[in-house]
Amino acid sequence: MPDLIIFAEPQIGFAPALLDSFLAALAERRSYRRVRVCITSRDKPLWRRRARFLIGYTVKALFNRDMRRRFFPDSFITVTAVARKHGIEIVEPPDFDVNNPAFIRRLQAETTPPDALSFGCLQIWSPALIGCFRRAVNYHNGYLPDYKGLWATRWSIYRGEAYSGYAFHVMDADIDTGPILLRGRVPVPPDADPDVIERAKLAAACGNAGTVLDAIFSETSEAQPQQDDGSYFSRRDTLALQRIEDPSAVTSAEIQRRLRCFPPLKIGFDGDLLPVTALRPAASAAHPLAFTTADGIALRATRLKHLPPWLYRLARRLGFLRAD
């Protein structure tokens, strides 16, 4: 029987929940001789993750009511804690570099090529690394071939899709272009919260853990090639959308749509870009944090990084917030 190595990125929110679901499904199977979890960046201690989350959440919820419904208990989980809960061996490549030659040599020395799963690994795998595995499968939170790249859920909502999807695909040398093993999608209601949609997709993906594992293990299961180029969105694409140096050149509806999907928006006020997380209609654009949009609507920034402007400035002055 082959081994299975699960690559999990601690900095990606969906990785712990996916790892937990797949390890639970593996416990019901005897498909693999040995299962290991490979950490692809330094995982914060559980207490530090919990403390940081609670402090950030509490501060935001005090000043932003919308944040109060975004308390997700699994935000307390770490990849390391999940692996230890299931009694799974944890491995770390040198310097957390999955393409490190020494790490690749270790994999190549395996008696039987292992299978691999990737949950949120942000490093592009080299052909040498991919070649170490019998089959390597990645989870992507976009409905491939559309929405390759980063922030797939938010881009699908921003572009007005009726559904937002996810996919498990076989990895190849390019980004999110490999044959699809399984995919699914969830409906996107009007004015949907991207975080809620992300959670709905994650729950659906976790529910398919057994199906995906059986498909990876079976040498007869065939992944379906992607039929067209689809779409791709990079970090640069998102940063360009978030940056609005001249809000008078953008309509009110467009600004609100961007704010819902990609907060904070860096909006220009007298040449100073500020991280806006909440806007409301204003009587005029006379206020220092107000402006008139391209369609003649006056808006005023009421929250900067979820804080009242005065508190944001104080926190910046005291060094609690870094410069944007």
Image: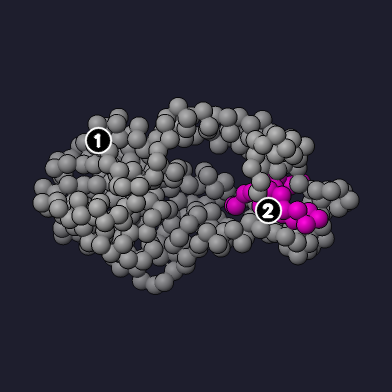
**Percent of width and height locating residue 277:** 67, 45
| Circle 2: residue type | Lys
Residue 182 appears anywhere in the view: no
Q: Looking at the rendered structure, which numbered label has been put on residue 266?
A: 2
| Circle 1: residue type | Ile
Q: Which of these two is toward me, 100 or 131?
A: 100
Is residue 209 toward the left or the right of residue 251 in the image? left
**Percent of width and height locating residue 79:** 36, 38
- Name the residue rendered at 41%, 71% in the picture: 229
Please name the residue that numbered disc 1 is placed on.
Answer: 88
**Percent of width and height locating residue 290:** 82, 50
Q: Looking at the rendered structure, which numbered label has been put on residue 225?
A: none
Q: Residues within 10 Å of mark 1 (few under 14, many from 20)?
A: some
Is residue 149 toward the left or the right of residue 114 in the image? right
**Percent of width and height locating residue 88:** 24, 35
Q: Which residues are magenta?
A: 261-280
